[in-house]
Image (tube, rainbow, N blue to C red):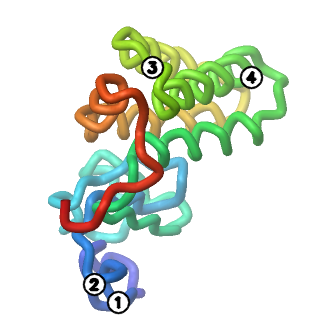
């Protein structure tokens, strides 16, 4: 796709739209390390400046599309697991922070989450970002924090209802 084309056009014109005709929930526009955009935020150019203005990043340009069946809590858990696994362990904020984030989100997803976990997640992400030797800690913190900010209702539901489903039914 040409540089600067809208994210909406990438999804609907070049990639064929959302699978099975489902509704769009969110998009990570530049790979797993980028903050998520909600469905109503995709009229943004696929270029560095436009993405920055939208509060995310162009990153690698690897677009991750999540439809209405996607559990954001489960997506966050998978993202946290990836970054914890990839941490080399050299610096304490990343080694400990990625592990804490993975454990807390997994607890929420599996029905062991507590209300105070939501603030703890934000605190850990805020303490990791900008305090690591390399950018891996930042790469974990930015998408996790954006999931919490943009989809708080899913995290709250997982805490209130004893966990997050692997997916949601389409159309509901």
Q: Which mark is residue 165?
A: none
- Classify residue 80 by image quadrant: top right
* 160 up-or-down from 82: above or below: above
Q: Are marks 3 and 2 in contact (CB under 8 Å)?
A: no
Mark closer to the chain start, 4 or 3: 4
Mark closer to the chain start, 4 or 1: 1
* Residue bearing the label numbered 4: 95
For residue 10, say whether it is visible: no
Question: Secondary structure beneath disc 3?
Answer: loop
Image spot of residue 121 (x, y percent) = 46, 20
- Classify residue 119 by image quadrant: top left
Q: Residues within 10 Å of mark 2 (few under 14, many from 20)?
A: few
* Residue bearing the label numbered 2: 12
Image spot of residue 130 (x, y percent) = 55, 24
User: Mark 3 to mark 1: distance in Å?
Assistant: 37 Å
Image spot of residue 98 (x, y percent) = 65, 27
Q: Are marks 4 and 1 in contact (CB under 8 Å)?
A: no
User: Mark 4 to mark 1: distance in Å?
Assistant: 39 Å
Mark closer to the chain start, 3 or 2: 2
Q: Are marks 4 and 3 in contact (CB under 8 Å)?
A: no
Question: Secondary structure beneath disc 4?
Answer: helix
Q: Residues within 10 Å of mark 1 (few under 14, many from 20)?
A: few
Question: Secondary structure beneath disc 1?
Answer: loop
- Classify residue 41 by image quadrant: bottom left
Residue at point 32%, 29% (across, down): 161
Image spot of residue 10 (x, y percent) = 34, 81
* Residue bearing the label numbered 3: 113
* 10 up-or-down from 36: above or below: below
């Amino acid at each position: 796709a040409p540089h600067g084309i809208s994210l909406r056009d990438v999804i609907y014109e070049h990639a064929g739209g959302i699978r099975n005709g489902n509704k769009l929930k969110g998009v990570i526009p530049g790979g797993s390390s980028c903050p998520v955009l909600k469905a109503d935020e995709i009229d943004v150019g696929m270029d560095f400046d436009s993405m920055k203005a939208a509060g995310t990043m162009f990153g690698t340009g690897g677009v991750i599309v999540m439809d209405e069946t996607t559990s954001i809590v489960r997506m966050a858990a998978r993202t946290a697991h990836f970054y914890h696994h990839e941490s080399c362990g050299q610096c304490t904020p990343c080694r400990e922070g990625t592990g804490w984030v993975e454990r807390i989100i997994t607890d929420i997803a599996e029905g062991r989450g507590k209300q105070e976990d939501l603030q703890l997640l934000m605190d850990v992400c805020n303490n990791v970002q900008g305090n690591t030797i390399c950018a891996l800690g930042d790469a974990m913190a930015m998408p996790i924090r954006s999931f919490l900010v943009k989809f708080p209702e899913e995290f709250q539901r997982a805490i209130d209802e004893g966990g997050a489903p692997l997916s949601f039914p389409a159309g509901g």
